[in-house]
Image: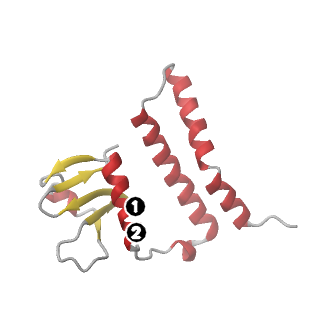
Amino acid sequence: MKMTVRDIADAMTTSHEGFAGLVCDSIAFSLARELTDEEQAQIYNITERAVSDAVCRLEGVSECEDKALSPSQFCDLADYLYSYGVFSGPGGIQGNEFMSLTVLDEPTDEPEGRKIYLRDRYPFAVYDFDTGYTILRS
């Protein structure tokens, strides 16, 4: 059986946690201290993006084109932002920041649904009507 690009891409994706763990260990060794949970989460997010970008390049752009999120995917992404983000209130994003952000509206019939903001195609903030922004800070 011959190895394919798909085999390599699948292996890269499934081995991400181990790779992120190795990066954490390497940085902890370099710093001569244990990493905080926040630092480990940041490393996990950065390596996950790097692996995802590399897999997209391997598989070709056509397989990684943007698609609409399902309601459950939107909720999962919003939950992630709530878990790792910082609540910043209604003034959490300044006017000049909006120019570099892409907005995803919650797939719902509700008139004032939540909004997720992306920066460089990655989740940056979630906005809840009448409460404000929860922002993922690095």
Q: Residue at x 24, y 52 (%)?
A: 134
Q: Nearer the viewer, residue 71 or 89?
A: 71
Coordinates of residue 34 in the picture (x, y in percent): 48, 24
Residue to which mark 1 is pinned: 76
Q: Residue at x 40, y 61 (%)?
A: 76
Query: Seen in the image, is 18 located left or right of residue 114?
Result: right
Location of residue 96 (image quadrant): bottom left
Q: Residue at x 14, y 57 (%)?
A: 131
Location of residue 103 (image quadrant): bottom left
Q: Residues within 10 Å of mark 2 (few under 14, many from 20)?
A: few
CA gap between label 2 and label 1 equals 6 Å
Residue to which mark 2 is pinned: 72
**Disc assigned to residue 66:** none
Task: Look at label 1 and name its amino acid.
Answer: Asp
Q: Residue at x 27, y 59 (%)?
A: 126
| SS for callout 2 | helix
Coordinates of residue 15 in the picture (x, y in percent): 65, 50
Location of residue 23 (image quadrant): top right
Does residue 96 sit above or below 69 in this rendering?
A: above
Q: Are marks 2 and 1 in contact (CB under 8 Å)?
A: yes
Coordinates of residue 20 in the picture (x, y in percent): 56, 42
Query: Seen in the image, is 29 located left or right of residue 122?
Result: right
Q: Nearer the viewer, residue 108 or 118?
A: 108
Task: Look at label 2 and name its amino acid.
Answer: Ser
Q: In the image as oriented, which residue stretches furthest toward the bottom?
A: 109
